[in-house]
Image (cartoon, rainbow, N blue to C red):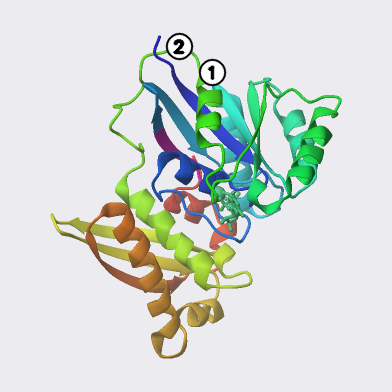
Amino acid sequence: MTKSGFVGVVGEPNAGKSTLINWLVGEKIAMTSKKANATRKRLTVIVMHKDHQIILIDTPGIHEKEKMLNKYMLNEALKVLGDSDLLLYIADSTKDTKGYEKFLALNTKNIPHILVLSKVDMITKDKLAQKIQEYETLPNKSYHEIVPISSTANINKDTLLDTIVKYLPQHPYYFDPELISTENIKDIYKELIREALFEKLNDEIPYESDVIIEKIIEKDDIDKVYAMIITQKNSQKSMIIGKGGKKIKEIGMFARKLLETFSNKKIYLELYVKTIPNWTKNKKMLEEIGYIE
Ligand SMILES: Nc1nc2c(ncn2[C@@H]2O[C@H](COP(=O)(O)OP(=O)(O)OP(=O)(O)O)[C@@H](O)[C@H]2O)c(=O)[nH]1
Ligand SMILES: [Mg+2]
């Protein structure tokens, strides 16, 4: 009677997808940000619940923009729409229903989905009831259930996990139940360093920057991580470094804490910055960073 399956986590940018995944697995593994369009690539996280295995796939927010990088991001989300056993559509409860209506048009394979109303700690009970009503009265709605949650205020975690399991297929475990992710350490560290860029930099800089992990030397008690931050313009490079190296030091300290919390080890982190003009629009460069398949 074991159940196991792939659960795509989709929704608009900033809806709270990555925060929800970290909350369900109980580890800070996916990068999150108050700025939208943070996640760029799929990320697989495995959650065991009552002897069932839920394989969650984090995705970039569904949005349309012209840049090649943004097209790649949308494509990542669309692939997961087609490939999953079940979808969680994460809808920010403080926003309108338009994102969900767009999703319905994209879900052409009619993959079963649960509508997860996120951030309910930010609204009153009355507003929540009203929001649920709005979704219930949509003529073409096709979710199996609505589950209101808050990842930051820890509301309805077990209800959500039980609901996910209810719609999972019967299947033996796909992965070792000890595993929390199929990603390699390089990709996880890269994302956590990207979170530091999103946290510490403003305007277009986080969107026009990325991280390439050059080398990790793993020892029992310490990981030495050598990473390159790439950005599009020399002016952005100067901002990332900051006066007397102040900014890059802040970025490094913030990133190091995230890496240490994740790995439970001491981290030595060396960062340097390189300008690569127009890398977000350059197919070859995107491939090198791992964004185009
Ligand atoms: N108050 C509140 N804030 C939340 C909750 N969940 C997420 N957030 C905040 O919403 C913002 C976006 O969260 P993310 O998890 O990065 O959103 P996302 O859907 O992964 O965004 P993209 O990767 O850009 O598509 C962050 O500032 C989170 O702290 C919640 O339950 N309550
Ligand atoms: Mg995200």
Residue 68, given in percent of the width and then of the height, sits at 62, 52
What is the three-letter code of the residue carrying label 1? Lys
> Eyeballing the image, is 95 above or below 203?
above
What is the three-letter code of the residue carrying label 2? Gln
Residue 30, given in percent of the width and then of the height, sits at 45, 49
Q: How many numbered circles does the render carry?
A: 2
Quadrant of the rendered image containing residue 127: top right
Residue at the (25%, 55%) spot, across then down: 264
Q: Which residue is mark 1?
A: 166
Residue closest to the eye, 91 or 102: 91
Quadrant of the rendered image containing residue 2: top left
Residue closest to the eye, 286 or 179: 179
* Disc 1 CB within 8 Å of nearest ligand 1 atom: no
Q: Which residue is mark 2?
A: 170
Q: Is residue 168 visible?
A: yes
> Eyeballing the image, is 42 above or below 40?
above
In the structure shown, which secondary structural element does the residue marked by tag 1 occupy? helix
Tell me the chief SS of the magenta region: strand
Residue closest to the eye, 161 or 82: 161
* Magenta residue span: 41-46
Residue 69, labelled with which disc? none
